[in-house]
Structures are given as C-alpha cells and as structure tokens.
Image (cartoon, rainbow, N blue to C red):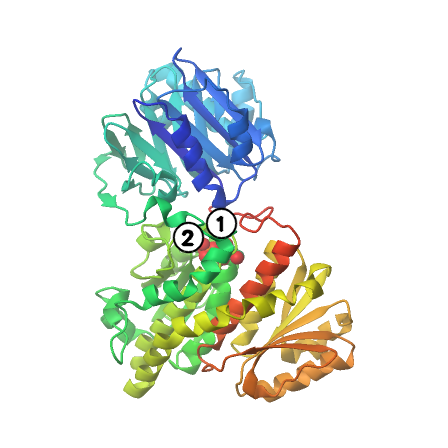
Amino acid sequence: MCGIVGAVAQRNVVPILIEGLKRLEYRGYDSAGVAVIDKGRCIARTRSVGKVRELEARLDVGLAGGTGIAHTRWATHGRPATENAHPHICRKTVALVHNGIIENHEALRRAQMQLGYEFTSETDTEVIVHEIYRRLAETGDLLQAVRAALGSLRGAYALGVITNQEPDRLVAARRGSPLVIGIGIGEHFIASDVAALLPVTQRFMFLEEGDVADITREAVTIYNAEGEQVERPIKQSEMSADAVARGEYRHYMLKEIHEQPRAIADTLENRIGLHNVYEEAFGHTAAVIFAQIEAVQIVACGTSYHAGLVGRYWLEGLAGLPCAVEVASEFRYRKPRLAPNTLFVTLSQSGETADTLAALAYARQLGLAHTLSICNAPESSLVRASELVLMTQAGPEIGVASTKAFTTQLVALLLLVAVLGRHRGLGPAGEAQLVNLLRSLPTQIEQVLALDAAVQAWVPYFANKQHALFLGRGTQYPVAMEGALKLKEISYIHAEAYPAGELKHGPLALVDSDMPVVAVAPNNELLEKLHSNLQEVRARGGELFVFADGANGIREDAQTHVITVPPTDDLLAPIIYTVLLQLLAYHVAVSKGADIDQPRNLAKSVTVE
Ligand code: F6R
C-alpha cells in the first residue's frame, strides 16, 4: 500500500526521503514521487511511474531542500500514471502525500471545481490538497489549515503536508492509516513505518487515531482528535537499520524462508518453561480472561487467515473449544451471533490490515469484551487496539509473500492452545508434550530446509504450466491453501487448493497431464483416505507431486514424484510441510523470472479496504 516519508532538517533531505522510499518498497506500489521546498522557497517535485530507482534516475541533480515529503503510490482511485503519483500540489503553494481513501472525494471535487480549482489527477487525494490550500489562504497557518480541512474529509488517511509559505514546517495527520514520527537531533521525520527511518533514527512517536502533528526541526507538537495538545511517548526501536538487509540471499522471500528456525525460536523464547507455556506472555490479565473463555472466533486475511484455519483444528481438537474462523472482509459486514464469552482473536503480520482492524472494532461493537491479537508488528494499530497481545517474533518481513510470519503465527496458536486447553482438560502431560514438540521445531525446520535441492528439481514440471492443484486433508487442507496462494501470488500460475476428499465432487474433471497435483501427506490418521484420493488422480492421468513422510508407503512411479520428509509429529506437520510449499513456490517463480519480493498488483500492508 502507499508509503509516506517526510523530513524537516538543516541538511538536504532528498537522500533521506529516497532511502526511506526504498525501505517502504516492500509495501507494494506502482509509482513514486518526492517534493521539497528548495533554496528559492519554491516547491520542487519529481514523480515517475515504476520503481523508486526510476524516480531516482529522473531526479534533477540540483533537487535539494531541508523540508520535504515523498511517497510510493499503490493505485486505488486513478490508474498508475505520473499525474496520479504523489505529492500533489495546489497552486505551487501546498504539497501533500496521502495514504488511505477519501470517501467523499466526488462531492468535494465538484464543490472545488465550482470554486475554480484545477484538477490535474484522477485521484481522491487531490481534493485534500485543494481543501488545505483554501484554508491556508484564509488563515495563513498550515496547522490550522490542515485541521480545518480534515473536518470536511470522510474516510481514512495518513498525511504529510508542506507549504512554501512556512518552509520549515511539516504537518502530519493520521486517521485509519499508520504514521510514525521519527525523532532526530535538530531534525524530525515522518513515515508509514519505522523501517523507513531506521538509517536516521531509532526513536519514534506513534500517532494515535485522529492525531495531528505540527513538526519543525526543533519541536513536535501533537493535538488529538478533540484538538487538545497531547503527549505521545517516545519509544526506542529495537530494529537495526540492517535488520532489513537481504544479505547473501537473492530475494527477501528466500532469506525469510531460511530465517524460520530463528524466528520460531525467538517466538518461543520467554514464552515456555520446562513443561509449560507462560500464560502471562499474553498479558497480565490473561489468566483471568482465559479461565472465562468458552469459544474462540478468529478473524484475519490472506495467509494469516490460513493460519487461523489450522488453528481451528487445534483449538477444537486439543483445547476442546468451539472455534470459528472467518476472513475479516466478510466478518465485518455480517451479523454474526457470538456467545458472550468468546475470545476474539485477530491474526496479522502487519497489524495494519484495514479489514482486520475494522473487524476488531466491529467485534467490540457487538459486545465482545475479550480480544487477543497475534501480530508481528509491535506498536501497530492492531496491537494497540487489542486487550491481549502475543507478538510473533519473526522480525521484519519484507517479501510481499508472507512466510515466516505464517509459521510463527502457527507457533503462537499452539501456545494459545496450551493455555486455553489447560482450563479445559488438556492436562499437564498434554501441555508438557506440546512444549517439548515446540522446542524441537527449529531443528526440524533446518532439516526440511535441507531438502531445497530436491524441491528445485521439480521446477521444470511447473514452470510451463498454467494451473496447479493442491491437496491436503485435516490440518493439511489449509496448508494446501497456503501453498496454492504462495504459488499463485509470486509465479502467477493459477493454483487451487482442495480438501482431498472433495476431488470427486468436481475438481477431478480438471485433472489431466497438464495439471500438476501437489499433495501434502504426513503420516496421520487420514493417510489411508489420502492414498485413495491420490489413486483417483493417477487413474485420470494426473501427475502427482507428493511431500510424504517416509513411513507412509507412497512410492515413486511414472506418474508420482515423491519428496520424502523426515518423520514429524502430526501436530507440527502443518508448519514443517508449509516450508516445503514455500520453497516450491519460490523456485518456480524464480524460474519464471518473476518479481519475487514485489509481485504485481500486491501490497505488503493492505491499509485500505
Ligand atoms: C500472502 C500475504 C497476504 C497477507 C494478508 C494479510 O502471502 O502476505 O495474503 O497475509 O494481506 O496481511 P496481515 O497478516 O499483515 O494482516
């Protein structure tokens, strides 16, 4: 989604803005732009379609200034085009960058056109810059102008605004889209997330909903939605500037796949004892709340939703709790009937997914008192809005295709199963067994990562195919869904996942030699049934690619390729087998020359509905 960077400093901020944009590239975008107040007190701007490096190549050598804003745009209103890229400027006086969606832009546009404002883009954003200009002309004060203009907007925004009338001032605002302020020495910054500013500061203030910030080199003054001056605490980030470097890896996605043993070990650290899970890891009120819980509702999007689907098998099967799972964009518009003692669990890597945030707000409105967020971004909106929080310690995930966030979410869900199950008869022995298994997980993942070459050897069977089918049963069904999502989003091969037992109810009609069928087959009680399903594929001339536990008797033949996976407990199998599906998607996409870390049309942080 759109990314914002801004700065007020003594030095030329253009290199800071460009570096910041590069660090936001992972969010997904199609055009970029930068504007500064130059030496002659004029707003100078460069914009371009495509990557930040293309913007950089177009920058005028002389472009320099101590106050500036920059943006990566992910098209919503108006196609990807230079004239739609931000910053938008009104009458050479006000420049603005925006992340979010203005719902009443059409009405504002009509009114502004009648007042003689000229529109140069198809965006919803342009009405904001005109609205601010109009108020600036009345008040002569940028802060007042922004606050007045915000009163006429409906929708979501994070904004950065500058004017050549007050060249040392930057005004920022947040409602519904993330924005942080970076605190330097004699200089200040804004950005959509912390990662953008790590080369210049590790100290941050996080704006709250409705906040407006008046930022100069010397000071940051924040006003809340009611217009009262408020203090927001300064927090020290533990992320280092090179935490997001790609290192020896060709792509972030590959790096992040290989980081999973470490990410999982970090997620377990300080959360488990010798034989038990620490309930306090979820928050100091967790023990009291968990004792009252009688059902669980999980809500998430995309890959995080798939983690929730696996979690349902565990919560019902091990913790003995009724559990429902739903995608956030559906949940938020339904009229669900939820028991009062339901724990509402949101899963999210970014903690900024608009639908998930809205679903959480809706759950509150429906009267659910107890909320838990399992999230990878500390200080994200979701974390701040949830009663209980369990952070996945995956570290920054830059590749748009989620990998380590997913497997650490599964680990977090197992921790939840342990603490909720404890109140419902999982028993100390069951909990101790679960903890032991979790402890062995990082080493087990190292072992499957060593199967990388075998996975790569399958690439030629997929690279020229248009479609692929993924099969699994039980907890492996959502794993198959995740494998199919990974393949489609980065290699652009159409991929569908089915519970293997459903094949004969329709999808079998698609099976022929042009449709590779991937199956995940750990050694569990559904194996016999899966065997028959695979037989159904073979009988129709389908070619099978099976990740199988060595003990389960699936043999290679002319139609069946098998990668033997080291034996693992059924409980850990969804995590182990997912890693192999991630590698398969990655290598197929690389062979097709795809843009692995920034697939077309996708954004890392989906901050609009
Ligand atoms: C797919 C992917 C997306 C995200 C989804 C939710 O690889 O990354 O499907 O899982 O956009 O994002 P978060 O987890 O940040 O809420």
Residue 4 point in image, percent of width and height: 43, 36
Residue 550 falls in which quadrant of the image? bottom right
Three-letter amino acid code of the residue under disc 2: Ser
Q: Residues within 10 Å of mark 2 (few under 14, many from 20)?
A: many
Residue carrying label 1: 604
N-terminal label among 2 and 1: 2
Three-letter amino acid code of the residue under disc 1: Lys
Residue 578 point in image, percent of width and height: 52, 69
Does residue 504 appear anywhere in the picture? Answer: yes
- With respect to residue 71, does 457 lie above or below? below
Mark 1 sits near ligand 1, with its Cβ under 8 Å away: yes
Q: Which type of secondary structure does the marked residue at label 1 adopt?
A: loop
Q: Residue at x 56, y 74 (%)?
A: 477
Residue carrying label 2: 350
Dots 2, 1 in contact, CB < 8 A: yes
- With respect to residue 313, does 383 lie above or below? above
- With respect to residue 196, does 463 lie above or below? below
Mark 2 sits near ligand 1, with its Cβ under 8 Å away: yes
Q: Residue at x 29, y 67 (%)?
A: 269
